[in-house]
Amino acid sequence: MNSKTLSQKLDALTRPAQFTETLEEEKVRCFACAHRCTLKPGQRGICQIRFNEKGELRVPWGYVAAANIDPIEKKPFMHFLPGASAMTFGMLGCNFHCDFCQNWISSQALRDPASNGAGNYVAEISPEELVSYAQRSGARIIASSYNEPLITSEWAVDIFKLAKQAELYCVYVSNGFATPEILHALQPYLQGFKIDLKCMSDAHYRELGGSLQVVLDSIALAHSLGMWVEVVTLVIPDFNDSNEELWDAAKAIACISADIPWHVTAFYPTYKHLQSPPTSAEILQRAADIGQEAGLHYVYAGNLPGRVGSLENTHCPQCSTLLIERHGYMVYRNVITAEGYCPHCGTKIAGIWG
């Protein structure tokens, strides 16, 4: 499928935007993400999938490029209904262009011709069908992931409205390049927000297509709005793995809340970032030690199951009792009380335990 054919296919699966404002001369401004693209008729946003058609912002609606049942630990969330299944759906497109993206075929559609094959996975579907799929599968959670969910928020909200009626939980798996307006709009529907903190260098963030301060502000605002926030840093050798940068990341999170879980996860060479070696267990252990020294109560290491010792598990920050034992995405033991307390010392364990 060439770029023109893919564009035509995706443009047909759109609706008028909700998260936009109309300007003079048929211009529109999008506020689904912090790029706040101002578009003339015929122009596309930085994401390439939101576009101005005759003075109306059109946005993706009515399809998925993937929909799967995953353990919530795969998102990853460690303090959000451990062991529960999440019906995870995704569309196409992203507002970043990270050269190490692990979902680049989905995320870089319409931006990189190498990803045009993603159009073959597009399947038309309704919000009702997706919620029904989640219910039939026994999922307790619906997650918007695979591509960047902020830029397809109208579609997600229509799904989440039905999910909420069905007493399902809703989460985003996002790069966090959000506007305050979109976070406030999502707050009634979104219980969980996983945010990537890719690095602590604004120069590097701008190379990826974003801004460090916007992401830090999004973490803080989502937390203050009552969403359960977990933060992930993909630790890439010779990119963001220095002690100084890891310390800055951990301190930035701890200054918002020491109870926000921080996941330091292993990188594997992929897409266009082939020059860095895979992240070792030793690097992840060093990153986790730094996170704990910075005052974070819950630090996890991911993508290397069985090789990171206790860093897959949840311990009580007060008495160190083993509360949740995991291997990879599997939960083997969970002794946190239904009300969310350590059974040994009674400390409240931050999270959504349901």
Image (cartoon, helix red, strand yellow):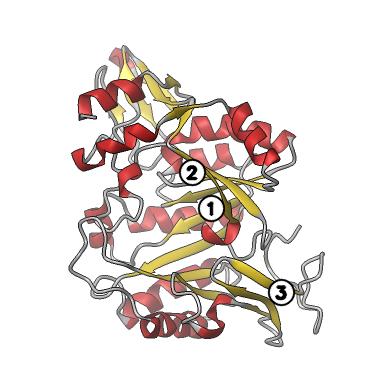
**Amino acid type of the residue that numbered disc 3 sits on in the rendered structure:** Arg
Residue that numbered label 1 is attached to: 221
Instruction: Identify the disc placed on residue 333.
Output: 3
72 shown above or below 111: below
User: How far is disc 3 from disc 1 in space, using C-alphas?
Assistant: 33 Å
Q: Which mark identifies residue 331? A: none
- Between 181 and 118, the residue placed more toward the observer is 118
Taking the spot 25% from the left edge, 70% from the top edge, the residue there is 239
Please tell me which residue is depicted at 41% across the width and 66% down the height of the picture. Answer: 233
Residue 27 is situated, as x and y percent measured from the top left of the image, at 30, 19
Q: Alpha-carbon neighbours of circle 3 within 10 Å: few (<14), some, or many (≥20)?
A: some
Q: Which amino acid does the dot numbered 2 rest on?
A: Pro
Where is residue 200 shown, x and y percent of the image? 33, 67
Q: Earlier in the sequence, mark 3 or mark 1?
A: 1
CA neighbours of label 1 inside 10 A, class few (<14), some (14 to 19), many (20+)? some
Looking at the rendered structure, the secondary structure element under dot 3 is strand
Of the pair 38 and 270, the residue shown nearer to us: 270
Residue sitting at 69 percent across and 39 percent down?
Answer: 136
Please state which of the two labelled residues, at mark 3 or mark 1, is closer to the viewer. Answer: 3
Contact (Cβ within 8 Å) of mark 2 with mark 1:
yes
Alpha-carbon neighbours of circle 2 within 10 Å: few (<14), some, or many (≥20)?
Answer: some
